[in-house]
Image (cartoon, rainbow, N blue to C red):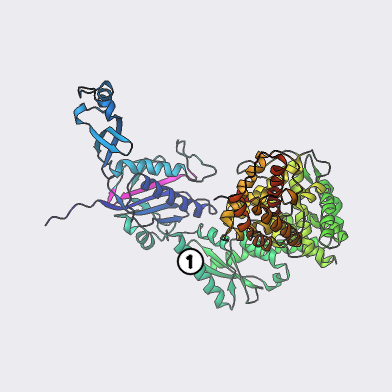
Amino acid sequence: MRKSAPTAADLLVEIGTEELPPKALRGLSEAFGKLFHDGLDQAGLLDDETLSPDIFGAPRRLAVRVPQVRLSQPDQTRERRGPALQAAYDDKQQPTKALIGFARSCGVAPQSLETLETDRGAWIVFRARERGRPASELIPEILTQALKKLPVPRRMRWAGLDAEFVRPVHWVVLLHGDKVIKMELLSVKAGRTTRGHRFHHPKPITLKSPQEYESVLSKQGAVIADFAARRAKIRQTAERLAADQGGEAAVDEALLDEVTSLVEWPEAILGGFDKAYLKLPSEVLATSMQDNQKFFPVTNKRGKLLPCFITVSNIKSKNKAKVREGNERVLHARFADARFFWETDLKTRLQDRIAELKHIVFHEKLGSVYDKAVRVGRLAARIAEEMGGEADHAERAALLAKADLLSGMVGEFPELQGVMGRYYASHDGEPQNIAAAIEEQYLPRFAGDRLPETALGQALAIADKLDTLSSIFGLGEFPTGDRDPYGLRRAALGVLRIMIEHKLELDVLGLLEYGADGYAAGVVEDVYAFMMERLRAYYADAGLSGDVFEAVLACRPTRPLDFDRRVRAVTAFIKLKEAESLTAANKRIRNILRQGGSADWDHVSELLLEEEAEQHLARRVAVLQNELAPLFDAGDYTRAMKHLAGLRPQVDEFFDRVMVMVDEEAVRDNRLALLNSLSSLFLRVADLSKLQG
């Protein structure tokens, strides 16, 4: 019995390049895999049951293997609708001009057209069987488009060619089953030939099929193509070497990604350094090892550094001792420099560096770093007072906060600004809360980063960020698109996180007004609106419904913590069985009040309450106004909303039995006043009319 011909086969594409940017490799490989897979799916070359693609990324290659890609698209029936049946034939059942014209446009005779019966009538249709195109014709364009869409910030050209890519391309593999798909990609002809490790196996390697890709590269080419497998090997060997020393490998995840992107065949090696260097601040040693040398530090069980490190080589050396000695020598030189900076910096007090800040420009239109420090100090003192702290300590911390920028250590390791300020302030005998605040002023540095823990650090961090926002907005230099050179989005989110997550009762609008004295009109409102957009993103990342945010925003709370309490209250409220009815009622009330004009609706007269239903509602609203006042004042919005949910029977009864817009003006206005008082209760929390459903 003859076997049927296969209808699908695994597909492999590999782009061989010069060394790719290590910090971008993982993102590039994942994006390439997704874009290529999605393109194949959109072209109809994948089944619903097709497994996820295998994505590979190494310093000199991006590759993806997609299982069971069809050899051609499925045949499809193309349908085109023509004139309605009643317009297609005349009284003598002869084709009309409309039918003849439609048939001509389809390239067929009128009698070969079909009829389509629908609920809306009968139509003339043209149906044609369209053969699917071969995958070999479709894949080159799909691949080209996937590469064009890659998130590459800057593409480069090479060798006078027109091709553009993140790095020069040297080879392309494009195999569908055991066959090569012919195409020229980035000025290179696709084939079945890949390359191994630059040093261990620089010769070409021929691939017979996609399935053998990673095994052949590993066994013959000394390349672990799978990013995750390479990453896991580095972690495991680093942890084993550290454990042999009685310690633990300090494996930073971002550094692990970067090291994984630098090596094709990882070999971890243990190195050591002089114990005398442990007298330097641990952050200095760790930064030098991690940021400069891409080493993993080793710590004891308590997290203190041990005098050893782990480096990852890209070759399997026959003489590991020489590799280790070379890395130790380089690290020794860096540590020696760091010790020189440390000892030199300690000879000058931070206080004595303050005057030098007048010579460092913060912004050409905003003055020096010293000028900023003075502004921040004034605002930080105000915040500290509101938090019940010491205003003089806040001003002192603000003046010293940027002084370490003039130190030799921060000049060598800019990422240690603030950290070194804490060390130097402690050495100078400054109060510990001031020393801690100097480091914490920069927190959070990125999304998800830790927040300042001390009250003074929180005040200083908030003041520094609000000053940056106000001053830069005052110049009209707003963030646009991905461009945000002053980190204003990060600053805004940092302020909001500190206030919300540390439960600080601070009025951000009031602080902006206090700190923005002297800036152009409208700056405060612009900054406040910008911060609310960052708050929207903050809640969106947490999975909050956008309409809940809009409902709270409509009430314009200016204290982020108060905003958060309202958000949590509304989120809890919409889960109640009464929520749907009361939300609909609030929408109706808002519409009625808009129709009613702008009369004085502050007072509800009992004498004008004619209907029993409106009397019931008025009594209940009056009781709740008194009961809820202390809850609103305490910010206990969740309990307040639960009480308001109890209004549903009276609200439903009112709308079932009472006509609001009656002819008698006094009665009408009294009913509008009742609805306004009811609406005002809900508006103490949020505008429920903004909620969906």
Residue picked out by circle 1: 232
Report helix, strand or loop for mark 1.
helix
Observer-nearest residue: 230 or 373?
373
Residue 169 within the magenta-colored segment of the rendering: yes
Observer-nearest residue: 534 or 101?
101
Q: Main secondary structure of the magenta part?
A: strand
Residue 582 within the magenta-colored segment of the rendering: no
Q: Which residue range is magenta in the image? A: 165-179
Taking the image as shown, residue 161 lies to the left or right of residue 276, namely: left
Answer whether residue 487 is visible to the viewer in this image. Answer: no
Observer-nearest residue: 337 or 517?
517
Taking the image as shown, residue 57 lies to the left or right of residue 463, namely: left
From what the image shows, is residue 474 above or below residue 303?
above
From what the image shows, is residue 77 above or below residue 215?
above
Quadrant of the rendered image containing residue 598: top right
Observer-nearest residue: 28 or 660?
660
Which residue is pictured at 30% across the width and 47% down the height?
180
* Position in image of residue 66 (x %, y %): 36, 53
* Position in image of residue 489 (x %, y %): 66, 49
Q: Residue furthest left?
A: 1
Taking the image as shown, residue 68 lies to the left or right of residue 545, namely: left
Answer whether residue 28 is visible to the viewer in this image. Answer: yes
